[in-house]
Image: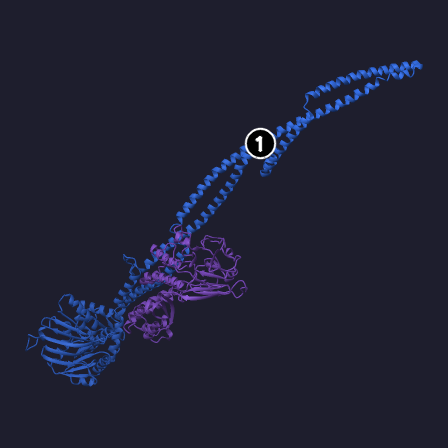
Chain colours: A purple, B blue
Amino acid sequence: MSKLKILHTADNHLGSKCSFLADYAATRTNDFFKAFQNIINTAISNSVNLFVLAGDLFDSPHPPLSLVQSVKSEFTKLKQNGIEIALIAGTHDDLIPSDSVYHDSFWDDFIFLKDPVLQQPHSINIQGIPIHIYGISYNTLNIQNPLPSLKRREGNGLHLGLLHCSIQNSPEWNIMPKDLPCSTEDLFALGLNFIGLGHYHNYRLYENNNAPSGSHPLQLISYCGSSEGKKFHESDERYVNVLTYDSEKLLIEKHPVQIKKMRDVEIDLLSVTDIQHLKNKIQEISGPDILAKITLKGEIDFPLHLEPLEEECRKDFTYLKLVDETDLYQKYPVHNIEQEKTIRGLYVRKIQEKIKSNPELKDVYERALKETLNYFAKDHNAY
Amino acid sequence: MHIKHIILSNFGRFKDKEIAFSPHLNLIIGPNEAGKSTLLNSIYGIFFGFKNMKEHYLPWNEPSSFKAGLSFVHEDKSFSLERNFLNDEVTLIEDKKKFQAKISPQGRRSERDIYFKKVQDYFGLSDPLLFRKTIFIGQNELLRKWTEEENVQLKSLLSGLSEHDYDQILNELEVKYFQLTKSAPNGMNKRNNRLLEEIQEQKKQLEAQLQISKETYENIESIKHKSSVLQEETTHLKKESKFLESLLPHISKFKNLLDKKNLLSKQYEEKNKLKNKSAQLSLQYQLLEEQSRLDKRIFFLPLVSLVFVWWWPVALSLLVATGAILTYVVMAQRKILNQKKDCSHQRAYLPTQTSLEKDLSEVAGQLHEIKSEIVEICTRYPKLSKIDDVKDCDILFYENQKIFTSHQKKIEEKTFAMFQIEKNMALSQKGITPPSKLLDDISILEEQEKSVKAKTQGLYWAHKILMESIQEYRQSFLETLSEDVSHLFSHITQKHPHVSILKDFQLKLKNDAQEFSSSHLSFGAKEQLYFALRLVFIQKLTHNKSLPLFLDDPFVNFDEHRLKSSCDLIEKYAQNHQVFFVTHSQSMINYFPKAHLISL
């Protein structure tokens, strides 16, 4: 019996602006599209038969026209290679707006599961294998729980689901919007062979160890994650899933697709001896494809002038943001300055008085001290 | 900084004189008029030029050439500086970079500003007057009184440059603050939006968008609900209308059937009556026939009297009786005959029984058909089953027709309302961004805002508190200086009066609760007091700079003990700074055993 190959992607967020990356923001938008092109090429080079997308292809329902044209040509490439396409809308590019990008007739050529509640799965036959595609385009207006509509129907072949949802108790559960909340148990209970998920941006694979053997092959649920990191904490590798299916088994493997890597790193300065040592530590994280936020923490016994350090290290990164969260009162040379009968000595004492009288503003005053300590230390060290 | 060597090409009594210096203590010894002060003043002159003393150092033998130069090290970089005193042309070379310009003390050229900015960098000051009042102590200059303007300059210099250039720090904090926000820490506003305002503006716009988006989404929900209610109502009305549309003709039909049924029932009844009458007449005729048949036999009855002829009374009685009976019979027969005639006559006017039966059967058949149709209609429209009067049919028809017309009107209204709702919904949904997307974007901006706000607040308070500290310190710095002078003066004299520096840098002393002016001190003690003051100035100026100190025989009036203490202080200073000490006294070698000796 012939094998079937399916590529699962989601959360491509094409057109994402990433304004927090300042000067790199515009190029970052292009990185997202390049990653999407990588996905298309992965589908073609792996000769997949079916390309499924679990929502948030675009970052908004109104992407720029030029981007839409480029995306259409990428989809056309898939069509030209005989690859079937099935997709759902996400929470960023939902179908509610009357001028949503998806109201274009271009999408009618594909299996687009637009309803918020599934009436009937879309059944197709590829290479003699029946495939039943279940899915809904989540709609915040829909008060009816759509999950029961995705329950497995009768029929041989592969039963495949697409869902843009929030799995309870995932690591992202507390930091991402909880649109269409559900549990893995809820999803496994649907009885589908595979559910390709979207919404949460880090890769996750859940296997149903209690899946009945026999007619139903192993049940799998997977977030393939976003194709590029949108925020610094989305620092894991970015993937698409490629599934191989025959009547007996369903295999899943992940393929990296990202263009640039996000890194959210903390360096504890307790173990750092001097500025050169710190530079070396930052250097270890660096790379021409790295966008990093490095938070400096802990006690420090040498003066730290953040901006020139950031400026110097930035050349080794695509983008670098240094954040100073060092423990100030251990920081050189506060104790020494505090004793001085000088302006800066008076300044440090005044800051301490303010912290004592307004402990709720401690962070603000400490920040003020940090801003000036760099100047006070300027003459002792390059940083 | 320290001066490495000097070349006096043509300066005063010197010609092509080259002297190398130590970076620490340089003791320049020579008899009177050996050129000791000239050498010291040449260093001053090379840097700043001479305003009034140029003639004093004009070369005696070759006045057409008046040049001197020196080389020095500043922050590990080597410099060479040469001045042509005739035209005040200065040549400054720093790592092969050459700066050449005419820098006269009175000039106002832009090159002069550039040059003095460099001098400021080397010495921390660029005012020649302040130079002479701080690190350059000429002969008999310790007790020289200063003008008010000089005092103000010195105060500003000392309070502003103690450790750092605090004004510069304040300025940089302000610049950084401006990069983030259009509001200045001092309350002034800049015209252009800065990062924080940009973020806050973007966030504000997104929040407004989110509000609209949420409202629109909620509206869509309520509109969809309204639309579905309207849809349901319209569907219901359409269903009812359809029923009424089909009911109305059936009511008419029902009415006709009811009419026909009534008519046929009547006909049937009449025919049946005729049939019954005919049957009755036939029966009556038969009876009459039977009655008339019996009478004929009775005619023979009188003959019975013949049997009793022999007994005539009986025979007569019998004859009479039979005669009476016969008469009665004849009479009865005649009546029957008449009745038979009558009966026949009536029968002649009636249809035949067969014909009547046929008619009845036809009417019954028609009636059955109508009844079946009625049952059929009543099954379909049960409410008709209760109606048996055609008048009720008319009422029912009228009522239902009225409802039908009203339904049609309602359907039209509701369809229009639905069209309007859908149109408005389509319009309101245009261009709307999903709340999830907006919330995501807002959360990114909030993170940015938090970080920029923290930095802005930090900068604001840094600027504010530093400004307060500078002001407070500058107001009280004379007290700090006074304490330092007291300490040094005590070190030199081994006496412990408390010295107070007044605003005009006059000094007052306090000893055992008694306050007295410095003029009450001896000449030597006064010089020692002002030397202590100079040293404090120099300490302030050299806090973060390695500055040379120029001393032109300042201790001539010091006794041995105090000379020793003062020299100790100089030697200590020379550990980290360059010192030029000029004297005519060979004995000074004993006080500075480690000094680099330069004999003139």
Task: Say whether residue B362 is left or right of residue B251.
Answer: right
Residue A191 position in % (x across, y down): 52, 60
* The one of B458 and A165 positioned closer to us in this rendering: A165
Residue B317 against residue B405 in the figure, above or below? above
Residue at the image position 26 percent from the left and 65 percent from the top: B171
Q: Residue B596 location in percent, x, y?
A: 19, 83
On the image, which quarter does residue B592 sit in?
bottom left
Q: Identify the element where label 1 is drawn.
A: helix
Residue B556: tell me if it is visible: no
Q: In the figure, residue B155 lies in which quadrant?
A: bottom left
State the residue position of label 1: B255
Where the C terminus of chain B falls, by quadrant? Answer: bottom left
| Within-10-Å neighbours for mark 1: few <14, some 14–19, many 20+ | many
Vertical side of B448 occupied by B211: above or below: above
Quarter of the N terminus of chain B within the rendering: bottom left
Which amino acid lies under the numbered mark 1 shown in the image of this protein?
A: Lys
- Name the outermost residue toward the right: B310
Q: Is residue B114 left or right of residue B480?
A: left
**What percent of the width, then of the height, locates residue A358?**
38, 64
Nearer the observer, B13 or A15: A15
What's the chain of the residue with tag 1?
B
Q: At 52% across and 41% down in the image, what residue appears?
A: B239
Tell me the residue at 66%/30% (across/down): B361
Residue at point 79% right, 17% down?
A: B333
- Check the image and report above or below for A158 versus A283: above
Left or right of A94 on screen, residue B261 = right
**Depth check: A104 or A184 in front?**
A104
Percent coordinates x, y for residue B475 in the rendering = 26, 67
Instruction: Please state which of residues A127 and B231 is positioned toward the viewer in this rendering.
Output: A127
Residue B579 drawn above or below residue A193: below
